[in-house]
Image (cartoon, grey):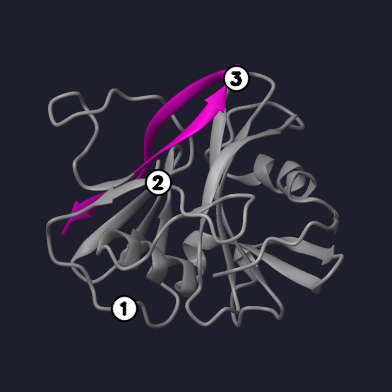
């Protein structure tokens, strides 16, 4: 399992996203956002090389954004458009930070999570599963992800196109009731966050069969 280092990043993740987010089609604000961390979780890379985080950030206008990110010790080939920025980590050195929807390692681990083969981890604590994250999908899924997946960005989500299924990664989070008849899709990843000082819960990823 990956280790959470108690150290600095310069610029911080929030600073990187503050500069990057206004250029995205799902950004709801005007001008520069004022972001605060509001939750999230991690997945482990089996090879131990890539950090994978699903971060939640609340803007001053109340909009809650979901930003999956990967952290790499070297650039990802042919992924310049997916680069959020670089940061100096106090222990690991330079980290290349990417939008995880374009990173095959992260997408592969989301598939593993849906297949019950990956365990979501607490965002800020080492070796601690996050049991509040629920993932389920009863249909067929690809055995793995080779190469960079095709993606389509929308105003509220990014669709990651895989063999036989689409992973719809929600970019703007909204609280949704839970339960088989309460509006939350049975297929996907559900997790919690905090907004306006109150706990919320809803879909982070939905699975759409081809």
- Distance between mark 1 and mark 3 Cα atoms: 37 Å
Badge 3 marks a residue whose secondary structure is loop
Indicate which label's residue lies in the foreground, 2 or 3: 2
Against 123, residue 88 (above or below) is below
Q: Position of residue 158 (x, y in %)?
A: 42, 50
Q: Which mark is residue 156?
A: none
Q: Which residue is mark 1?
A: 144
The one of 22 and 106 positioned closer to us in this rendering? 106
The residue depicted at 60 percent of the width and 79 percent of the height is 49
Q: Which residue is mark 3?
A: 62
Instruction: Give the side of residue 164 with respect to residue 78, left or right.
Output: left
Q: Residues within 10 Å of mark 1 (few under 14, many from 20)?
A: some
Q: Position of residue 90 (x, y in %)?
A: 87, 65
Please tell me whether the stretch drawn in magenta is mainly helix, strand or loop.
Answer: strand
Q: Residues within 10 Å of mark 2 (few under 14, many from 20)?
A: few
Q: Quadrant of residue 60?
A: top right
Q: Position of residue 15 (x, y in %)?
A: 79, 45
Asked whether residue 23 is drawn in magenta, I would say no
- Distance between mark 2 and mark 3 Cα atoms: 26 Å
Q: Quadrant of residue 202?
A: top left
Q: Which residues are magenta?
A: 190-210
């Amino acid at each position: 399992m990956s280790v959470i280092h108690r150290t600095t990043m310069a610029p911080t993740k929030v600073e990187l996203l503050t500069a990057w987010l206004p250029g995205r089609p799902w950004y709801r604000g005007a001008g520069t956002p004022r972001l605060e961390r509001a939750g999230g979780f991690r997945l482990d890379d089996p090879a131990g090389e890539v950090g994978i985080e699903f971060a939640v950030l609340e803007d001053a206008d109340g909009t809650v954004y979901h930003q999956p990110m990967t952290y790499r010790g070297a650039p990802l080939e042919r992924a310049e458009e997916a680069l959020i920025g670089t940061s100096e980590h106090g222990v690991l050195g330079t980290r290349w930070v990417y939008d995880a929807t374009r990173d095959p390692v992260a997408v592969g681990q989301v598939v593993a999570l849906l297949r019950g083969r990956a365990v979501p981890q607490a965002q800020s604590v080492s070796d601690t599963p996050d049991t509040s994250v629920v993932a389920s999908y009863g249909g067929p899924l690809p055995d793995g992800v080779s190469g960079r997946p095709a993606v389509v960005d929308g105003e509220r989500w990014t669709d990651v196109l895989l063999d036989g299924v689409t992973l719809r990664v929600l970019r703007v989070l909204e609280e949704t009731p839970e339960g088989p008849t309460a509006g939350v899709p049975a297929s996907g990843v559900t997790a919690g966050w905090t907004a306006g000082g109150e706990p919320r819960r809803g879909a982070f990823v939905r699975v759409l069969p081809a």
